[in-house]
Image (cartoon, grey):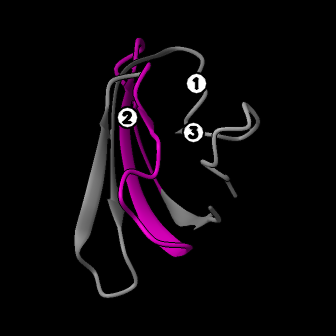
């Protein structure tokens, strides 16, 4: 869950990693429309013009060891 309301707490969705050299995360709304992309290990999503709701993400990453990682899940956004 994150709350991009400008109070300085939970204002962005950021993926914290260790040992990753590449990261890509696509974020979709409940209708399956891609609304954002996080590219790179320092990337983040600030919610942009998105409404409150539940969003789905698909993450792919590559470690410095060459291993491939894939994960998917949900993000709750409350403004």
Residue 13, given in percent of the width and then of the height, sits at 56, 43
Residue at left offset 47%, top offset 42%: 46
Q: Quadrant of residue 35?
A: bottom left
Question: Is 8 above or below relative to 50?
Answer: above
Instruction: Tell me the distance, in whole angstroms, between the alpha carbons under discs 1 and 2.
Output: 10 Å
> Which-is-in-front pick, marks 1 and 3?
3
Left or right, 54 with reference to 61: right
Residue hosting label 1: 17
Please tell me which of labels 1 and 3 falls first in the chain. Answer: 3
Residue 37, label in figure? none
Residue drawn where x is 42% and y is 21% of the image: 41
Label 1 with label 3: CB-CB less than 8 Å: no
Q: Is residue 65 above or below residue 34?
A: above
* Marked residue nearer the N-terminal end (2 or 3): 3
Give the magenta part as a residue range: 42-71
Element type at marker 1?
A: loop
> What residue is pinned by disc 2?
61
Give the image location of residue 3, x and y in percent.
Answer: 67, 53
Q: Residues within 10 Å of mark 1 (few under 14, many from 20)?
A: few
Residue farthest left in this picture:
33
Q: Position of residue 21 (x, y in %)?
A: 37, 15
**Image quadrant occupied by the N terminus:** bottom right
Disc 3 target residue: 12
Please tell me whether residue 55 belongs to the stretch shown in magenta. yes
* Residue 17 position by quadrant: top right
**Label pair 1/2, CB-CB below 8 angstroms:** yes
SS at badge 2: strand
Q: CA distance from mark 1 to mark 3?
A: 15 Å
């Amino acid at each position: 869950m994150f709350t991009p309301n400008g109070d300085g707490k939970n204002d962005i969705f950021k993926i914290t990693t260790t040992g990753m050299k590449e990261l890509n995360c696509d974020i979709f709304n409940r209708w399956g429309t891609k609304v954002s992309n996080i590219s790179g290990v320092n990337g983040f999503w600030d919610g942009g013009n998105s409404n409150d709701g539940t969003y789905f993400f698909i993450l792919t990453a590559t470690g410095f060891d060459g291993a491939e990682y894939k994960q998917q899940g949900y993000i709750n956004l409350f403004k």
